[in-house]
Every structure is written in structure tokens, then in C-alpha cells.
């Protein structure tokens, strides 16, 4: 029977098939491993500790990759990666570095003015929605399950008056679209209320909960930050309790953005509330130093609030682990 193939051609074809099958198998098991690691971090039921990379770098380009190992060496389980400029993120190299050190990469967002999803300008909203969708894709590729921060309007935007019903509707509609996209990637969005000097839109936990409920999608949650709570809330305990199961992410920062445990934040109230709602996700150190000039200007950090960025990270982590052990027993 004529096959049209010589013995040599047949052997070459079989070798190519073997190589292709091996590559496909390696790809399959690689992706399976990534997903299992991601699921472990999501469902392990244990508090995980993270640090925002703005502590050491103003942007996440290749020069910032070394910070992943630095965070791991200090004792963190994860890092928050700023997603404002996606073009400078080398996804493959970042993914490899996260894997190498067994660190989780989470997305952090402070939407700029030209990507304001609550804007009255439709073109601006569309740009913001597309940017958020790309951020979802990048976060998922890095093995993360959340993007937290000022995701509902532009960070730093101040109009001189309260938000309008139209702006609220724009934000809700935009977030609905982004959330429906994020559902496919297993990524959740965390709404962070920030203080009145950084936004007029969402300042309190109650407003963040209201926005999340209006969006009404499974992938929308709330992200609280003790620095902002210290300015805007009546106390620390009740807002956390009232947020309840919607609480997806916690930034644990001192009142002056210094080392956690050295100021007047009511940490017992914070951790008592976290214990009562059975919180089991991320506790993150987020602070800034005057060395990061752009970030310092945006967050009004004009003086040293700690001996160094490393001290903010390591000493803050020690304190937060101590409080976690005391109240959450994990």
C-alpha cells in the first residue's frame, strides 16, 4: 500500500508529533499548576500578608522586578502591582519572578483623569473601561484574583462639589460592564473609599457598600484602608462590621502612614471586627516615602514618617502578624 511517505519522512513526522505532544502536555500541566496555586491562595482560609510596591518604586517596570524577592525575604506572601501603566509591565518576566519566589501578584488601581469611568465624556469612560479590562487580563495572567483601589472614578479628581446622580450612574454602568468581563477571569474588583482630599466620590465604607450593591455583580467587593478610615469614619470597628462579607481587601496603615502600631489607629477595634466577620483574605502594608517623588506629591508625604521604607515594611509586618495571631488565630 502506497502511503506517499518514505521511512525517513515518517520518522521525522513522528518525532515532530512527539515534540508537539510533549509541549502541549507541559503547557497543560503548567497551567494546571498555576490554577491550583491560585485556588490554594483563594480558598486556604488563612490570612495572607502583602505589601504595595509603591513603597519602593514609582512604577512597575523591569527595574522593579527585584522587589518581588525583597518582599518575600521580608516575609510577605504577596505584592500589589500598580496597573495604571500596563505597557511597562513585562507580564512573562513578572509571572516567572512571582512563581520563582512563591509570591502572589495582585492588581492595584488609581484611575487617572483620562480613564475616568464616571466621566460625563463617553470617550473617556470607554477608555477607562478598556483599561480596566486589560488590567483584569494582566492580573489573571499573573495569577492574581483581585484589583483593588480607586476603580470607580479618577483618583485625585476634585470638582469642588459632591458627586452627582449622573456620575454615580456612569460609575455603576461602567463597573457592571467591567465586572461581567472580570467574571470570566476569576478576578474581583475592590472599591476603596479614600479621604476627601483625594476624592469627592466615595469616602466611607457605607458609600462603598452602596456602590457595590448598586453594581450588583458577584465580582464587586469592598476594600478598606485604615489610613482613610482614620479621617472619614467615626470609628474603626463598626464600618468593618457593617461591610461584613463584602470586605475583600484590607490596607492596614497607621494614621500618619508610618509604621503600623506606632500611631493612634484603634488596632484592637480593627482586628476585633475582622475576627467577628471571619475575614480571611489580605492584610497589606501600604505606605509611601518622600523618596518616591511622584507618589509623595499625590499622597502629600512631605516628611519621613519612618526611618526607611524597609522599616515601614518589616516592622509593620511584625506588628500586623502579632495582631492577626491575637485576634484571628491564623
Image (tube, helix red, strand yellow):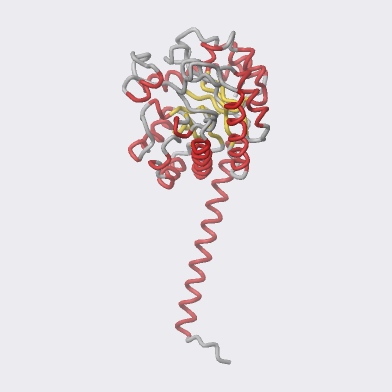
Q: Is residue 283 above or below residue 186?
A: above
Q: Nearer the viewer, residue 159 or 19?
A: 159
Q: Nearer the viewer, residue 39 or 289?
A: 289
Q: Answer with left or right where residue 130 lies relative to residue 297.
A: right
**For residue 164, what is the image quadrant?**
top right
The number of callouts visible is 0
Q: Answer with left or right where residue 165 lies relative to residue 89.
A: right
Q: Answer with left or right where residue 211 lies relative to residue 129.
A: right
Residue at the spot 55% in from the left edge and 48% down from the top edge? 33
Residue at the spot 51% in from the left edge and 63% down from the top edge? 22
How far from the left and from the top, in percent, is residue 126?
A: 52, 39
Q: Is residue 265 above or below residue 223?
A: above
Q: Quadrant of the N terminus?
A: bottom right
How far from the left and from the top, in percent, is residue 119?
A: 52, 30
How far from the left and from the top, in percent, is residue 43?
A: 63, 35
Q: Nearer the viewer, residue 284 or 126?
A: 126
Q: Nearer the viewer, residue 327 or 168?
A: 168
Q: Quadrant of the C terminus?
A: top right
How far from the left and from the top, in percent, is residue 48?
A: 54, 29
Amino acid at each position: 500500500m502506497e502511503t506517499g511517505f518514505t521511512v525517513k519522512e515518517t520518522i521525522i513526522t513522528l518525532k515532530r508529533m512527539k515534540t508537539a505532544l510533549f509541549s502541549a502536555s507541559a503547557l497543560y500541566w503548567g497551567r494546571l499548576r498555576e490554577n491550583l496555586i491560585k485556588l490554594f491562595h483563594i480558598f486556604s482560609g488563612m490570612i495572607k500578608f502583602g505589601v504595595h510596591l509603591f513603597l519602593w518604586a514609582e512604577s512597575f517596570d523591569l527595574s522593579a522586578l527585584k522587589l518581588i524577592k525583597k518582599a518575600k525575604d521580608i516575609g510577605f506572601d504577596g505584592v500589589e502591582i500598580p496597573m495604571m501603566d500596563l505597557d511597562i509591565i513585562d507580564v512573562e518576566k513578572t509571572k516567572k519572578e512571582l512563581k520563582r519566589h512563591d509570591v502572589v501578584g495582585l492588581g492595584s488601581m488609581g484611575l487617572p483623569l483620562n480613564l475616568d469611568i464616571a466621566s460625563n465624556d463617553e470617550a473617556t469612560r470607554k477608555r477607562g473601561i478598556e483599561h480596566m479590562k486589560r488590567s483584569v487580563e494582566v492580573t489573571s495572567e499573573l495569577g492574581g484574583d483581585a484589583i483593588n483601589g480607586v476603580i470607580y472614578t479618577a483618583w485625585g479628581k476634585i470638582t469642588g462639589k459632591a458627586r452627582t446622580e449622573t456620575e454615580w450612574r456612569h460609575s455603576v454602568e461602567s463597573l457592571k460592564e467591567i465586572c461581567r468581563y472580570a467574571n470570566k477571569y476569576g478576578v474581583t474588583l475592590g472599591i476603596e473609599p479614600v479621604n476627601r482630599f483625594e476624592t469627592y466620590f466615595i469616602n466611607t465604607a457605607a458609600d462603598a457598600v452602596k456602590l457595590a450593591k448598586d453594581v450588583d455583580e458577584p465580582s464587586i467587593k469592598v476594600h478598606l484602608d485604615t489610613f482613610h478610615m482614620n479621617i472619614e469614619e467615626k470609628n474603626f470597628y463598626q464600618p468593618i462590621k457593617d461591610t461584613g462579607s463584602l470586605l475583600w481587601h484590607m490596607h492596614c496603615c497607621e494614621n500618619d502612614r508610618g509604621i503600623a502600631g506606632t500611631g493612634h489607629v484603634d488596632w484592637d477595634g480593627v482586628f476585633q471586627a475582622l475576627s467577628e466577620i471571619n475575614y480571611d483574605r489580605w492584610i497589606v502594608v501600604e505606605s509611601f516615602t518622600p523618596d518616591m517623588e511622584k507618589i509623595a506629591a499625590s499622597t502629600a508625604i512631605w516628611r519621613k514618617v519612618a526611618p526607611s521604607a524597609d522599616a515601614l515594611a518589616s516592622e509593620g509586618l511584625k506588628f500586623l502578624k502579632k495582631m492577626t495571631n491575637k485576634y484571628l488565630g491564623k
